[in-house]
Amino acid sequence: MTHTIGTEAIKKGTGKSWQEWVRFFDGIEAGELSHKEIAQKAYGHGAPGTRISVPMYQKAPGKVALSVQHEKLESTEQVEHWRAYWKELLSQVS
């Protein structure tokens, strides 16, 4: 399924405009990289070797629930750091 999204939503959700993302991807030569390599460059601040999944489902018409599962973190400190990070990020999505 494909869902279109406006450039304003991209700016709001990522903090970067569509043009900034295009320049970034051109700068890293994204056309020559795998999806994993692109993600590592775009979100390089993440915890290497961990796995992130974001399950979503429709609760009711017009309402969607989602959660973040961040697995393979090495320590309690990492868990707490990433819990706070995801909580803050998700609070911006509405």
Image (cartoon, rainbow, N blue to C red):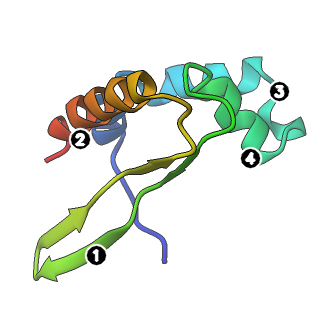
Name the amino acid, label 1: Tyr
Name the amino acid, label 2: Leu
First in residue order: circle 3 vs circle 2: 3
Tell me residue 33's x, y (percent): 85, 38
Q: How far apart are marks 3 and 2 (CA)?
A: 29 Å
First in residue order: circle 3 vs circle 1: 3
Disc ID at residue 57: 1
> Residue at image x 38%, y 30%?
82
First in residue order: circle 2 vs circle 4: 4
> Residue at image x 35%, y 22%?
15
First in residue order: circle 3 vs circle 4: 3
Q: Distance between the residues labelled 2 and 4?
A: 23 Å
Name the amino acid, label 3: Glu
Disc ID at residue 29: 3
* Residue 87: quarter of image: top left
Query: Which mark's residue is nearer the viewer, 1 or 4?
Result: 1
Tell me residue 38's x, y (percent): 72, 35
Q: How many labels does the image show?
A: 4
> Helix, strand or loop at disc 3?
loop
> Residue at image x 69%, y 37%?
49
